[in-house]
Amino acid sequence: MTLAARLSAIDERIAEAARRFGRDPGEITRIVVTKFHPAQLVRDLHALGVREVGENRQQELTAKRAALGDVQDMRWHFIGQAQTNKAAAIRRASDVVHSVDRVRLADALHRAADDDRVLDVLVQVNLTDDADRGGSTTADAETLAEHVLSLDTLRLRGVMAVAPLDEDPSSAFARLRAVADRIRLLAPEATWISAGMTNDFVQAVEAGATHLRIGSAITGPRPDRG
Ligand SMILES: *Cc1c(COP(=O)(O)O)cnc(C)c1O
């Protein structure tokens, strides 16, 4: 299958899932995760109409964005674990940061602001019991959201999570949905739920995801670090 065929096959499955769960497909944004693939792939996706891409490492994001310097209308999503000392570089290269998982990182992204641009951010929630996985605990997420709301160079858009490997994604995403609902009471405009990857996007659509992060089903297997 060609890249174009894989892309349209996934979009058809997303639309089908949306219809099945009574959602409007137009309210679901499909982000293509291009990590480990060359910048040319991002260019090819752009030619196919893709305008939202995701990367999980700062250096790779920065390099690809520079390589596509002539492309103005691509939105770059940073979806990886972020080191505080990379905050300035992440801020510079990202339109949206999905992985704000601690107060220190929010503060670092805020301090790195060097123009009037307000950065869109999501609070990442850890749905596993493993504290080493990225994300704030479900209990801490609201406190973190409140902190983000106090920083005027950041705009809280919602929540993000990765489903655990050892649990049915539906129950995990239901917990994320509950956190999202509580945060929306604090910030009605924080409506985004970033959840769902190649193997669990249907369950994410069912749970109310507004942003799906889909890599390998569209790009094919990842080179090197698969
Ligand atoms: C790699 C990655 C994805 C995409 O994963 P696929 O299974 O290839 O669709 C989504 N979200 C995050 C945070 C990732 O690191």
Image: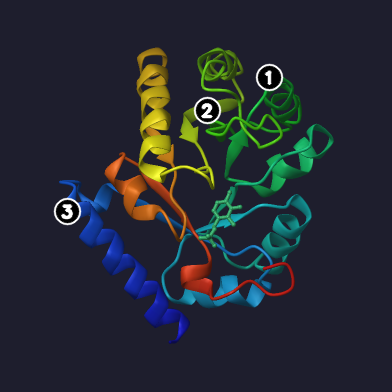
**Within the image, what quadrant is residue 134 found in?**
top right
Could you say where residue 43 lies in the image, as x and y percent from the top left?
A: 57, 74
Identify which residue is drawn at 69% across, 25% down. Answer: 110
- Nearer to me, 196 or 107: 196
Q: Secondary structure at mark 2?
A: strand
**In the image, ligand 1 is in what quadrant?**
bottom right
Q: Nearer the viewer, mark 2 or mark 1?
A: 1
Q: Amino acid at mark 1?
A: Val
Q: Is residue 110 visible?
A: yes
Could you say where residue 98 lies in the image, as x and y percent from the top left?
A: 56, 39
Distance from disc 2 to disc 3, alpha carbons, whole Å, reads 32 Å
**Residue identifier under label 3:** 20
**Residue identifier under label 2:** 155
Q: Is residue 124 left or right of residue 133?
A: left
Q: Earlier in the sequence, mark 2 or mark 1?
A: 1
Distance from disc 1 to disc 3, alpha carbons, whole Å, reads 38 Å
Residue 11, label in figure: none
- Nearer to me, 20 or 117: 20
**Residue identifier under label 1:** 103
Q: Earlier in the sequence, mark 2 or mark 3?
A: 3
